[in-house]
Image (tube, helix red, strand yellow):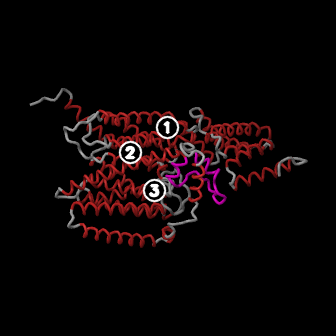
């Protein structure tokens, strides 16, 4: 009998526990991202990123090699695509490139964990079940929002945009909640139909899945409705293919039952939605040719033409969207509402080519895994398999996002981007075991080492930037709550840790102006206005493409009678946002004030 080397028996349990701990930290990171408004604000994404980074570090302790191995082409495609995103984000000057930088780093860590450590179908199913269970909390909050219509949020200091009755759960926007529920919902269906779970567990998953789809209906997201239908159709087609290949004598009957089930599901959903006039109106207006999204897409195409190959850089649509907006688009165009065009205008043809390589490699590998699972099922006494269920669920979830990304920007929401990184990781490493004596090149240890390294970087950057982001957010909240004195103190605290955030100088400038307006003596107000001018000038230096800061400078100059300088700033603001009705109105008021101040009017009329 061969005696194992000294220490091996003691270290194996530790390695096993490290794998479970990495999966637990990963799931916690995904949930925290969702809790803090999907990570939409940089500060609120840090807790989730920290847990994800910690999971990446723990993964290095999981030193035993997995019996499952990720596809090489998928790994190369991911490295090329997300590597380019990281490189382009690093090369883009300015604060507003940071969200994409963190999102790409986090996605690489989540993906790396899924293909190197979280490869067991049991652990993967547990992560999916955890996300499904937490989605019930989203829906519960959404029910309150839908019934009360008062923008209720469970965590009081988090606020969402006013969407009336539409449910958004912990998220700011209902469309983002729909982007979550359409993914976990289709995984729930797949685990019920194809997973090897006990009946009681499938019943619980079934109830949770129904609740998720009810929550999706309450979001009123038309993109969510379309993507839900796409995912269910993809699931139905894949399921029929399984039966046709593995049980050829039964597949026609199965196809007929599937068709009847789809029709029944559609009818039930229609009846339920019609119970609410508001949801019925939104569902009946899914195809809206007059939607403002079309104007956002046109602006993105104009932006892309400036730098067709490499794009204009990460986070730059917030500037060029304003510059190229149409007259009828007066809402601030921060996002393209189309992930494909957003990628194209900011990352160019190279970014688009990288995405095509990434997606085609994963779809190819997903289909190969699917065929392998089907062949195994054909030779087995049972068709049920957790790996097959996860594969079909991942394929169907990707189908949902292929559709939803046409009309929304879920992949620019960190929580949903991390979720999709997990889904693509399921595809890249389907969990097919290698033979025990199969060669395992040292190359395949590299993803685990890289995952741990990126996890360390993610943890370090979150820790380095946290205090600056924290005080900046506190300054914003104090300014919103009409407490300019506190906002000034908090903004100055933030400046001790962060000097690259133009929004921070914007809060400081606005707070100084608000404080100045509470004073009656000109000699007391003057230093505050000068401080505001200095703050806005610094913001303008940090983000020269943004028309907001020169507009604030112009307004401040008008307040102290420096109309010549205000004119220059209005010129800059109008060049950056030429079709803004608000800018036009402010400029008109500026000319009137200037004319009244001069005996012989000098301003250009």
In contact (CB < 8 Å): disc 1 and disc 3: no
- Judge by depth and name the residue closer to the eye, 272 or 548: 548
368 vs 52: above or below: below
Q: Which residues are magenta?
A: 316-345
Decide if residue 6 is on the left or right side of residue 447: left
SS for tag 1? helix
Residue at the far right: name it.
Answer: 599
Q: Nearer the viewer, mark 2 or mark 1?
A: 1
- In the rendered image, residue 79, in percent from the top left (x then y), is placed at 41, 40
Which is closer to the viewer, label 1 or label 3? 1
3 vs 2, front mark = 3
Residue 532: horizontal and vertical position, in percent?
A: 70, 39
Q: Is residue 32 left or right of residue 17?
A: right
The N terminus lies in quadrant: top left
**Can residue 51 be seen by looking at this rendering?**
no
Q: Residue at x 62, y 40 (%)?
A: 502
The picture quadrant where one finds residue 439 is top left
Sequence-wise, the earlier of marks 3 and 2 is: 2
Badge 2, how many Cα within 10 Å: few under 14, some, many 20+? many
Q: Which labelled disc corresponds to residue 28?
A: 2
Residue corresponding to mark 3:
177
Q: Nearer the viewer, residue 188 or 229?
A: 229
Q: Count neighbours of disc 1 (C-alpha within 10 A) and say few if under 14, some if 14 to 19, many if 20 or more.
A: few
Is-magenta flag for residue 409? no
Q: Which mark is residue 87?
A: 1
Residue 255 in the image, given as x and y percentages of width and height: 28, 68
Q: Are marks 2 and 1 in contact (CB under 8 Å)?
A: no
Q: CA distance from mark 2 to mark 1?
A: 28 Å
The structure residue drawn at horizontal position 65% and vertical position 60%, both measured from the top left corner, is 328
């Amino acid at each position: 009998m061969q005696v194992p080397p000294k220490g091996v028996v003691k270290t194996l349990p530790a390695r096993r526990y490290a794998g479970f701990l990495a999966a637990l930290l990963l799931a916690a990171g995904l949930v925290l991202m969702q809790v803090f408004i999907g990570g939409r604000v940089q500060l609120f994404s840090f807790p989730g990123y920290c847990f994800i980074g910690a999971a990446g570090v723990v993964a290095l302790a999981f030193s035993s090699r997995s019996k499952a191995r990720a596809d090489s082409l998928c790994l190369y495609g991911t490295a090329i695509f997300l590597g380019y995103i990281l490189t382009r984000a690093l090369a883009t000057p300015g604060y507003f490139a940071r969200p994409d930088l963190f999102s790409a780093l986090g996605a690489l860590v989540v993906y790396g964990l899924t293909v190197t450590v979280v490869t067991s179908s049991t652990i993967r199913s547990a992560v999916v079940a955890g996300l499904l269970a937490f989605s019930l909390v989203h829906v519960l909050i959404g029910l309150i929002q839908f019934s009360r219509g008062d923008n209720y949020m469970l965590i009081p200091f988090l606020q969402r945009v006013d969407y009336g009755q539409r449910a958004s759960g912990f998220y700011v926007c209902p469309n983002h909640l729909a982007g979550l529920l359409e993914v976990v919902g289709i995984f729930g269906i797949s685990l019920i139909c194809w997973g090897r779970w006990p009946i009681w567990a499938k019943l619980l998953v079934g109830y949770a899945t129904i609740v998720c789809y009810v929550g999706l209906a309450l979001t009123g997201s038309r993109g969510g409705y379309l993507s839900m239908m796409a995912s269910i159709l993809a699931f139905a087609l894949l399921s029929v293919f399984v039966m046709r290949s593995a049980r050829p004598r039964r597949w026609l009957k199965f196809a007929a039952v599937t068709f009847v089930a789809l029709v029944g599901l559609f009818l039930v959903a229609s009846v339920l939605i019609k119970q609410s006039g508001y949801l019925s109106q939104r569902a009946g207006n899914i195809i809206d040719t007059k939607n403002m999204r079309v104007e956002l897409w046109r602006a993105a195409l104009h932006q892309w033409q400036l730098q067709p190959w490499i794009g204009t850089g990460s986070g730059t649509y917030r500037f060029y969207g304003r510059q190229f907006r149409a007259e009828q688009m007066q809402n601030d165009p921060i996002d393209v509402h189309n992930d494909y065009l957003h990628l194209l205008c900011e990352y160019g043809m190279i970014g688009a080519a990288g995405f095509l390589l990434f997606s085609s490699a994963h779809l190819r590998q997903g289909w190969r895994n699917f065929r392998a699972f089907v062949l195994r099922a054909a030779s087995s006494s049972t068709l049920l398999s957790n790996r097959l269920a996860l594969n079909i669920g991942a394929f169907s979830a990707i189908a949902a996002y292929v559709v939803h990304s046409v009309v929304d920007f879920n992949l620019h929401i960190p929580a949903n981007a991390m979720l999709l990184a997990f889904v693509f990781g399921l595809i890249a490493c389907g969990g097919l075991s290698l033979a025990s004596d199969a060669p395992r090149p040292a190359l395949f240890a590299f993803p685990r080492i890289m995952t741990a390294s990126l996890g360390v970087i993610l943890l370090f950057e979150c820790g380095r930037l946290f205090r600056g982001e924290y005080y900046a957010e506190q300054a914003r909240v104090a300014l919103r709550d009409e407490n300019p004195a506190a906002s000034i103190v908090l903004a100055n605290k933030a400046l001790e840790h962060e000097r690259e955030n133009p929004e921070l100088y914007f809060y400081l400038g606005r707070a100084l102006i608000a404080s100045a307006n509470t004073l009656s003596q000109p000699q007391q107000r003057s230093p505050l206005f000068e401080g505001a001018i200095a703050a806005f000038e610094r913001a303008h230096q940090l983000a020269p493409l943004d028309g907001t800061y020169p507009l604030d400078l112009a307004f401040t100059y008008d307040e102290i009678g420096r109309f010549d300088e205000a004119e220059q700033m209005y010129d800059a603001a109008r060049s950056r946002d030429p079709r803004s009705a608000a800018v036009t109105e402010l400029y008109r008021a500026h000319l009137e004030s200037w004319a009244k101040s001069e005996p012989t009017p000098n301003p250009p009329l």
